[in-house]
Amino acid sequence: MRERLCRVCGGWHDVDAWPHNCLPERSHAASDLPVPNYISDGLNGVQSMLDGRIYDSKSKLRATYKAAGVVEVGNDPARLRPRQKPKPDRKAIRDSVEKAAARFSRGERTSPQ
């Protein structure tokens, strides 16, 4: 007989005869399928950009890519654009440093010394 600690009631229950009132509540988002996160290998006839043939299986298509040494990428054009770095506001930085230096020279401190 194997027992485990119940997270619902805090007691110990037999694993093979778990009480129904201690089963966790199912959320509405949970699927009734036995494997809700299953991703199939099937395709609806995709033409390969490498050899022009039609493939019905992702694994067979990717095997031809791998054999040819090709890297499979998506079609998002945003990944090809160079990223723009925000330019710092030099005037705001200079003003802030000058203000901090002036407060320090006046003797202002954040903590008593």
Image (tube, grey):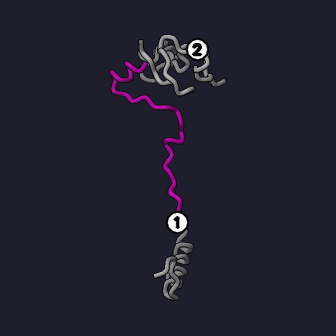
Which quadrant holds residue 62?
Answer: top left
Region rendered in magenta? 61-88
Q: Identify the residue shown where x is 37% and y is 28%.
A: 70
Helix, strand or loop status at disc 1: loop
Amino acid under label 1? Pro
In the rendered view, would you say 87 is above or below 93? Answer: above
| Residue 40 numbered tag | none
Which residue occupies the foreground of this view, 111 or 47? 111
In the rendered view, would you say 18 is above or below 27? Answer: above
State the residue position of label 2. 33
Instruction: Please provide percent x and percent y for residue 24.
Output: 59, 23
Q: Residue furthest right?
A: 28
Amino acid under label 2? Leu
| Residue 88 numbered tag | 1
Is residue 46 one of those drawn in magenta? Answer: no
User: Which is more N-terminal, label 2 or label 1?
Assistant: 2
Near mark 2 (Cα within 10 A), the count class, few <14, some 14-19 or many ≥20, is few
